[in-house]
Each structure stands twice: as structure tokens, then as C-alpha cells.
Amino acid sequence: MSHSQLEMLTGLAKDARDQAGKLLAHERQTEQQTAAQLQSLSQYRAEYAERLQKAMSEGIDPATMYNYQQFLASLDAALSRARQALIAQQQRVQQSQQHWQQEQRKLSSYDTLATRRLSEEHRRLERHEQKTNDDLVTGRLARQRNEKPH
């Protein structure tokens, strides 16, 4: 794999990781909104149940009682759906988190490969430089021996 190919793969991996990060952020934001909606709905249900209790303590006719109970039942059904939606959203967040981690590992692998390549290139250059220096020293010593009168 050439250096430019590795750079291209690293760039693609960064883009994929960044996209996965954006998706994860969006999923987390949606999770927070879903949790807030569930909280609001729960609070509304509690307030409505409290109104029913107050109305019952003050006296309430059967038709009004029935309406309260029907509305509470519809709130309970909405709460159930909201809880299911939150669970589903939490699963999407988890999947997005795993996808981001996978993309991050891929990018780290390419970075590690690039670092190794760079280290190998430095070692190769150092060996070449050392060999060149050794050859120069060897050549100088050989000339000095040849220049000495016998």
C-alpha cells in the first residue's frame, strides 16, 4: 500500500468516524427530547390524577368520573408508547455508539500503520546515512594507508 493510498484511507476513515459522531450526537439529542416528553407526560398524568382525587373528595357525578377514568386510561396508553419509544431510542443511541467506536478503531488502525511506516522510513534513512558515513570513513582510512610511504 503506497503512502498516498494510506493517506486516502485515513481521510476516508476520518470522514466515516465524523459522520458516525454526528449521527450519535443526533441520536443522543433525540433520546433527551424523548425522555423530556415522557417526563412531561408523566407529570401531566400525575396532575390529572390529582385533579380526579380532588374532584372525588368534593363529590363527582358518575359521567364525569367515567370521563376522568377514560382520559387517564388514554394517558396511560400514551405513557406506555412513550416508554417504548424511549427504549427504542436508547437502543439506537447504543448502536450509534458502537458504530462510532468501530469507525474510531478503524481510524486508529490506519494511524498506527502510518506511524509504523514513518518509523520504518526513519530507521531506513538512519541505516542508509550510517552506511554512507561508514563507507566514507572506510574510504578515508584506505586512502590514508595508501598514502603512507612503505
Image (tube, rainbow, N blue to C red):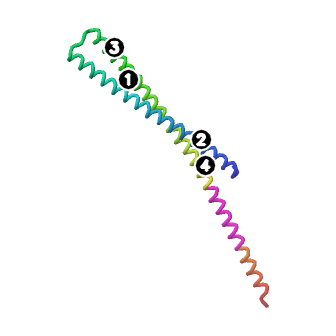
Residue assigned mark 2? 16
Residue sitting nearer the eye, 33 or 125 = 33
In this rendering, the label closer to the viewer, 4 or 3: 3
Task: Look at the image and give the residue range highlighted in magenta.
Answer: 116-133
**Which of the two labelled residues, at mark 3 and mark 2, occupies the earlier sequence position?**
2
Query: Please, which residue is most extreme toward the front here?
Result: 58
- The amino acid at mark 2 is Ala
Neighbourhood count class around disc 1 (C-alpha, 10 Å): few under 14, some 14–19, many 20 upward: some
Q: What is the spatial separation of the Cα atoms under label 1 and label 3, in whole angstroms?
A: 14 Å
Q: What is the spatial separation of the Cα atoms under label 3 and label 2, in whole angstroms?
A: 50 Å
Q: What is the spatial separation of the Cα atoms under label 1 and label 2, in whole angstroms?
A: 37 Å
Q: What element carries label 1?
A: helix
- The amino acid at mark 3 is Gln
| Residue 75 spot, x, y in % from top left | 36, 20
Q: What is the spatial separation of the Cα atoms under label 4 and label 3, in whole angstroms?
A: 60 Å
- The amino acid at mark 1 is Leu
Residue assigned mark 4? 110
